[in-house]
């Protein structure tokens, strides 16, 4: 979700159209229209968000599978970073251009770094936060 918010934020900063980057992801279905659509729409914005979200869930599932229950900070952070880097490399070097996230056509290269970094942080953060421990009740 944080990566989606950053896509919208950077889209707003770059084109004054927060939905433009998310709309671009709908190129998977509407390749000719996705990059021209700047305003919010069910067809492009919701579809783009769902595609981006499904891709994030795919990578998060891979991360959780490889994490194997580990909770210590170093392996959690290293694996999250490796997952985010792998996602970027696959998105931009393995899949056909039509299946890239698409928002790279609306954003700047440094924006992409922050988006994928935020994704990595989102993977690791739940395992780095302190957990509430149940309080033991004392019976007298």
Image (cartoon, helix red, strand yellow):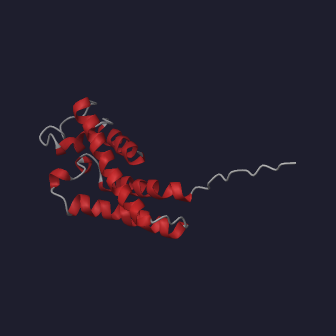
Tell me where residue 89 sits by quadrant. Answer: bottom left
Where is residue 73 shown, x and y percent of the image? 54, 66
Where is residue 88 shown, x and y percent of the image? 30, 60
Where is residue 50 shown, x and y percent of the image? 29, 41
Return the residue found at the far front: 140
Query: Front-most of 82 and 8?
Result: 82
Query: Front-most of 101 and 51?
Result: 51
The quadrant the N terminus occupies is top left
- Note whether 134 is above or below 24 in the view shown: below
Rendered residue at 53%/64% (across/down): 71
**Residue 113 shows up from this direction:** no
Return the residue found at the far right: 140
Rendered residue at 44%/56% (across/down): 123
- Note whether 75 is above or below 130 in the view shown: below
- Taking the image as shown, residue 61 lies to the left or right of residue 139, namely left
**Residue 17 shows up from this direction:** yes
Return the residue found at the far left: 32
């Amino acid at each position: 979700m944080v990566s989606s918010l950053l896509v919208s934020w950077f889209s707003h900063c770059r084109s004054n159209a927060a939905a433009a980057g998310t709309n671009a992801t709908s190129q998977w279905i509407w390749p000719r229209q996705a990059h021209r659509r700047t305003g919010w729409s069910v067809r492009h914005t919701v579809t783009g968000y769902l595609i981006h979200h499904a891709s994030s869930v795919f990578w998060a599932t891979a991360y959780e599978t490889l994490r194997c229950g580990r909770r210590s900070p170093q392996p959690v952070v290293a694996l999250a970073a490796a997952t985010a880097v792998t996602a970027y490399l696959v998105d931009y070097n393995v899949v056909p251009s039509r299946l890239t996230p698409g928002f790279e056509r609306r954003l700047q290269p440094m924006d992409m770094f922050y988006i994928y970094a935020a994704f990595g942080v989102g993977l690791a953060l739940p395992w780095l936060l302190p957990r509430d421990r149940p309080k033991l009740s004392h019976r007298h």
